[in-house]
Image (tube, helix red, strand yellow):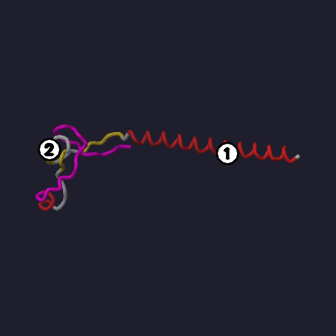
């Protein structure tokens, strides 16, 4: 999945925020300028599209959680079976 983010044209950083100065907000009516938190550049920021690596990490975590769930559920069933077998042997 592609992720869109604003990139500073001066230093290439994605650490940017909307410029909320009085002139920018009230002259345009919306925020079109951004400020770079790294180098201080203020102005129009291009949008960059990048592959989101976090999606793959989340899929791996999800697979691991599912595997753990099914394994733990299987172990629970085995333990219950062993418990009932032990109880029936002891009651005989």
Task: Say which of 87 and 1 sits in front.
Answer: 87
Residue 41 horizontal/vertical position (percent): 14, 44
Residue 55 horizontal/vertical position (percent): 42, 42
Judge from the rendering whether residue 67 lies leftward or rightward of residue 20; answer left or right.
right
Q: Which mark is residue 76?
A: 1
| Mark sitting earlier along the chain (2/1) | 2
Residue at horizontal 83%, vertical 46%? 88
Residue density around tag 1, few if under 14, some if 14–19, many if 20 or more, within 10 Å: few
Task: Say which of 78 and 67 sits in front.
Answer: 78
Judge from the rendering whether residue 65 lies leftward or rightward of residue 50; answer left or right.
right
**Number of marks:** 2
Magenta residue span: 1-23
Residue 38 horizontal/vertical position (percent): 19, 41
Report, in whole angstroms, how far the alpha carbon at label 2 lies from the one at label 1.
59 Å
Look at the numbered disc 1 and give the secondary structure of its residue.
helix
Residue position for label 2: 41
Residue 4 on the magenta span: yes
Q: Quadrant of the N terminus?
A: top left
Task: Please determine whether, in this image, residue 15 is positioned above or below residue 30.
Answer: above
Q: Which mark is residue 12?
A: none
Judge from the rendering whether residue 37 lies leftward or rightward of residue 59; answer left or right.
left
* Identity of the residue furthest to the top in this view: 11
Residue density around tag 2, few if under 14, some if 14–19, many if 20 or more, within 10 Å: some
Residue at horizontal 35%, vertical 43%? 2
Nearest-to-viewer mark from 2 and 1: 1
The part of the image, by quadrant, that contains residue 67 is: top right
Residue at horizontal 84%, vertical 45%? 90
* Identity of the residue furthest to the front in this view: 90
Look at the numbered disc 2 and give the secondary structure of its residue.
loop
């Amino acid at each position: 999945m592609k992720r869109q983010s604003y990139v500073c044209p001066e230093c290439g950083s994605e650490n940017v925020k909307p410029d909320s100065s009085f002139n920018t907000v009230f002259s345009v009516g919306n925020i079109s300028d951004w400020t770079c938190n790294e180098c201080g550049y203020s102005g129009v920021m291009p949008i960059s599209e990048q592959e989101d690596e976090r999606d793959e990490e989340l899929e791996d975590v999800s697979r691991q959680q599912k595997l753990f769930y099914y394994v733990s559920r299987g172990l629970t069933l085995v333990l219950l079976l062993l418990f009932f077998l032990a109880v029936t042997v002891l009651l005989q």
